[in-house]
Amino acid sequence: MPSQKSGENGRGALIASLALLVLLAAVSLATRPYVPIDETRYVSVAWEMWLRGDFLVPFKNGMPYSHKPPFMFWAFQAGWALFGVNEWWPRLVSPLFSAGGLWLTWLLARRLWPAQSGVGGRAALILAGTLLWIVFSTAAMFDVILAFWVLAGMHGVLSAAEGRRRGFVLVGMAIGFGVLTKGPVILLDLLPAAALAPWWRPGLPHEGTPTFYGLKPVKDRMNWMRWYGGLALAVLLGAAVALVWALPAGLAGGEAYRNAIFWGQTADRMVDSFAHRRPLWWYLPLLPLILFPWFVWPGLWRALARLRRAGLDGGSRFCLAWMLPVFVAFSFVSGKQPHYLVPLFPAFALLAARALSGQAFTRIGVPASLAIALGVWLVLAGSGQIASVHRQVAVLPPVWPGVLLILIAGALWFAGRRGISGVATLALLGVSALACLQLAASRSIEPLYDVRPLAGAIRQVQDSGRTVANTATYHAQYQFLGRLEKPLAEIRGAEIAPWLAAHPDDFAVVYLDDPQDVQAVPARFKQAYRGGAAVLVDSRTAAGLLARHRE
């Protein structure tokens, strides 16, 4: 375990944070499959683009897919071009961008507080040990990639504030690639901090007054006009970068796809966000979990209180201008998901690292106690002592990951009492907690979410010349894992009975609510699926199953 002096300074702490990421990525690759419906859908979209040789228009189950831009799909295909089509490469894309995010966070700390060499190392460790960041650092999803572009854009904001015009170019490029990753949401993640520059970089200082972290002083109102003009040009540059893809893709994808990517990704997405209302305060009770272990560490709150009493420097204000307006905005938008907050975590890590600068907080009793409690819960679950777990898993989880977590948390608690850095021990604690949880869950949950066996059975039926239909909303969860080269027929509601009657020799995937019902079904293939069961049956059997279900 590194000490306060050696473990958190400079490159050593950055390397330690990257090592923690590698450890967690290895555990994730070894213990969990692609999880339906999101991960399986996104890798299947990339697979269909690969099959078609079409790198402009994403496709899902044979139809243009307008819900997400193509950057992550391009990243998947780039790896396939280098290494051949495989399952492991798409699962490494987020870890690679996460590693880039740790590096950019480290560099950002060096720019914000150049006289304090330890802040960058602490920031990287804090980010690498934050629960939601590390969860999505191993998921085939967009949020950590988006956070990478937000970090790149923040470097551009600082460069522009230093008087380098190329900083606005970097902001524009980050906006463009952010739009290509997850749409215009990057404007919300990036622009508030830039717009609040008058707060984190006060203007009009007297001649000879020290400036914040090397930034050149703004001497008159005209400079602020130029500043906001530069931001406007950066937004236009970002739009131009995105349009390099969107214009030819819109022409190639047809009118419906064109309308979807130019309208549905902007105004319609905002309207839809209010369709599934969650209360204004919904994120607040989640913060102790998604920011574990830091949010529940009293040492961090004492450090933040000291920073506030001492007065916020320009770097701290920069982090708050980045973090708070976006958090408030996401709170007011009714459609809420925890991973929407991922691009804010580097700002949290930087602010926390700055608050801890010069402090020697080592005791980690509260987070360690919670980790031990989680370990005890895992042991009880593996022993069959928790009825709710027993009913919802395929098999009981093993006991040893819970025991391992108890031992690790106890050792780290003891290390803190002996004066070892609280930041280093908590980063390891956060990664250990998630790794042990994944190790415990892999055997018991994997059968409920691993659809590779069913996808392979569908491929066999298609290869025999038969058509396969899906009798519920289809998220393309079988396309890549079965290496399917034909779409499934999507039939729902009133469409199901006529289709089954017209295709008596074909097959359908039917979903059962109770996994016990699957025992008596004469199926080509059957398996547990997300709390229920999925069966691949001929059309006549499917019609009978669905008729009984309606009764």
Image (tube, grey):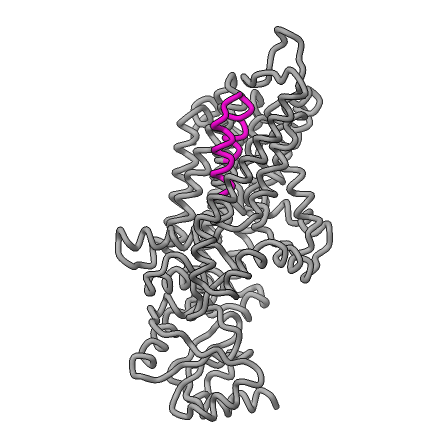
Question: Which segment did they paint magenta?
Answer: 153-176
Task: Indicate the position of residue 334 as horizontal and vertical percent values.
Answer: 69, 55
State the predominant SS element of the stretch in magenta: helix
Task: Indicate the position of residue 162 as horizontal and vertical percent values.
Answer: 53, 21
Q: Nearer the viewer, residue 261 or 18?
A: 261
Q: Is residue 440 above or below residue 404?
A: below
Extreme top residue here?
208
Can the viewer see residue 405 in this picture?
no
Q: Residue at x 52, y 85 (%)?
A: 496
On whether residue 169 falls in the magenta region, the answer is yes
Q: Residue at x 59, y 41 (%)?
A: 189
On whether residue 163 falls in the magenta region, the answer is yes
Q: Is residue 289 left or right of residue 172?
A: right
Counting labels gives 0
Task: Indicate the position of residue 34 as horizontal and vertical percent values.
Answer: 42, 61
Please tell me in which quadrant of the rendered image residue 199 appears: top right
Q: Nearer the viewer, residue 175 or 352?
A: 175
Can the viewer see residue 521 in this picture?
yes
Q: Is residue 505 left or right of residue 434?
A: left
Q: Is residue 420 above or below residue 35?
A: above
Task: Indicate the position of residue 69 as horizontal and vertical percent values.
Answer: 48, 54
